Amino acid sequence: MRSPLERFYAVIPAGGIGSRLWPLSRADAPKFLHDLTGSGSTLLRATWDRLAPIAGDQRIMVVTGRAHRAAVEQQLPDLADLNVVLESEPRDSSAAIGLAAAILEKREPGVIIGSFAADHVIRGDRLFRAAVAQAVNAADQGYIVTIGIQPTEPAIGFGYIRSAGEMGLDGADSAMLVDSFVEKPDLDTAKQYLASGDYLWNAGMFISRADALLEEIGKQEPALLAGLLELAEVWDDPAARGPVVDRVWPGLKKIAIDYSVAEPAAEAGRMAVVPAHFDWDDVGDFASLAKLNSGGRKSDLAILGENARVLADSSSGIVVSQTGRVISLIGVQDIVVVDTPDALLVTTSANAQRVKSVVDALKISGRDDVL
């Protein structure tokens, strides 16, 4: 049998609009299609470039919405056509990752898959590859595996993983059993987590044998598994696929893979975590975006936008400009200004997480034209 890494297939779920980055991120231009670091690459392209040396160009699958197919294929010209999986409508991560697992298991029994979000920022490719290699080896031994990030501060914007000791797995020396997953904490709790040394940031990366992942979904959501297997059975037959997708996909349960797989597997002692030390951020709001683009220096003002025209005096935070309009800032700290042709956002880093409530209010009021 081929080695675990030779049987590895990378899956990139590219969905969600990143509502906390509105009005920069929209339904027709979601977060993963933007260059948010000034590197010249979109987050999606950077994810591909990080995974290709591990899996190879022909062993990367992208799951995305039909509306984003053209943009995704433009960004990833080496993406094989059979590895583009299109969702007719969003059904959350269990359906997206589960369908990829079902398709790949049917094509290649025994395949090991790894799911890596299209819209995260990672720096330290060598450390990333080493962590993935350990995770793949642990997954080959039957575990659902995640990669946890060693915390560097008491962050309140991330979920956490509580570890329960090393496991002594072959080829995965640092893998630890997962005790539990913890939701985003308040600041005092986050400080306790950091001080204890028992907690890692949950980066939402999952590596598993495809059959093990599907088995776990079936234990918790048998109807969902049945639908995914029915879709996978016809997926590579274009003539048969359409009618089955139209009938089955809309009825699949919306549930995050954290709840259908990760948390139940942890409770049953089947979840492992590989601690990692590379720099990682899910770019969850404009506060994290400001930090990424200012090198962590609180006094700096980060500016994004090819034609940005910003005048600043004694100010810090972030300005994102898509208009070329002159923006003047005087004596404001931790400011967030996002200027687009049809919407303007002004807030502070401390309130960055609340941008999602603006998006929710726009949805309720029927203002879909700016979403």
Image (spheres, helix red, strand yellow):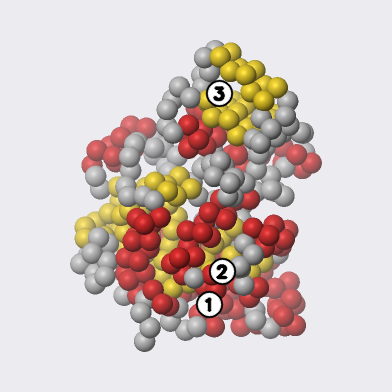
Measure how far apart labels 3 and 1 are at the Cα level. Answer: 46 Å
Q: Amino acid at mark 1?
A: Leu
19 or 253, which lies in front?
A: 19
Q: Which mark is residue 186?
A: none
Crowding around mark 2 (Cα neighbors within 10 Å: few <14, some 14 to 19, many 20+) is many
- Give the image quarter of residue 369: top right
Residue occupied by mark 3: 335
Q: Is residue 327 above or below residue 197?
A: above
Q: Amino acid at mark 2?
A: Met
Residue occupied by mark 2: 61
Position of the N terminus, as image quadrant, is bottom left
Q: What x and y, as percent, mark residue 206?
A: 43, 62
Q: What x and y, as percent, mark residue 255?
A: 54, 59
Of the numbered discs 2 and 3, the one sitting upstream in the chain is: 2
Q: Is residue 251 above or below residue 21?
A: below
For the residue labelled by badge 1, is the local secondary structure a helix, a strand or a loop? helix
Q: Amino acid at mark 3?
A: Ile
Crowding around mark 3 (Cα neighbors within 10 Å: few <14, some 14 to 19, many 20+) is many
At x 59%, y 50%, the residue is 42
Res. 22 visible in picture = yes
Residue occupied by mark 1: 104
Residue 77 lies left or right of residue 287; in this view the side is right
At x 52%, y 14%, the residue is 314
